[in-house]
Image: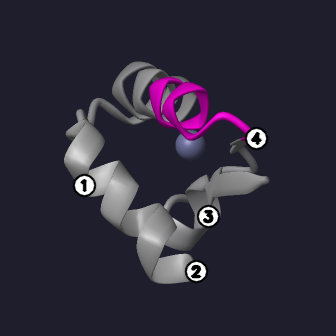
């Protein structure tokens, strides 16, 4: 199980993308950040966020 928690990246936002499929979690979060925050993270950057969390 991996998760990307929007709040962890400095947003006042309760969005959490989570699941067992890393690529789906990344896709979901990347869509959310582009739609809601106007920020497009690269898949590599989001992968780093997940890796750093352990
Ligand atoms: Zn958000």
Residue 34 location (% of width, % of height)? 35, 25
**Mark 2–mark 1 distance (CA, rounded to whole Å):** 15 Å
N-terminal label among 4 and 3:
3
In the rendered image of this protein, does residue 7 appear above or below residue 19? Answer: below
Q: Please give the range of residues in magenta.
A: 19-27
Residue carrying label 3: 7
Residue 42 location (% of width, % of height)? 20, 39
Q: Is residue 22 magenta?
A: yes
Mark number displayed over residue 53 = none
Disc 3 C-beta below 8 A from ligand 1: yes
Is the residue under label 4 in contact with that under label 1 (CB below 8 Å)? no
Q: Residue at x 55, y 79 (%)?
A: 53
Residue carrying label 4: 20
Mark number displayed over residue 45 = 1
Residue carrying label 2: 54
Is the residue under label 4 in contact with that under label 2 (CB below 8 Å)? no
Which structural element holds mark 3? helix
């Amino acid at each position: 199980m991996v998760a990307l928690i929007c709040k962890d990246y400095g947003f006042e936002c309760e969005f959490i993308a989570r699941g067992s499929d890393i690529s789906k979690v990344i896709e979901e979060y990347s869509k959310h950040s582009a739609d809601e925050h106007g920020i497009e993270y690269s898949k590599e950057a989001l992968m780093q966020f997940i890796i750093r969390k352990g």
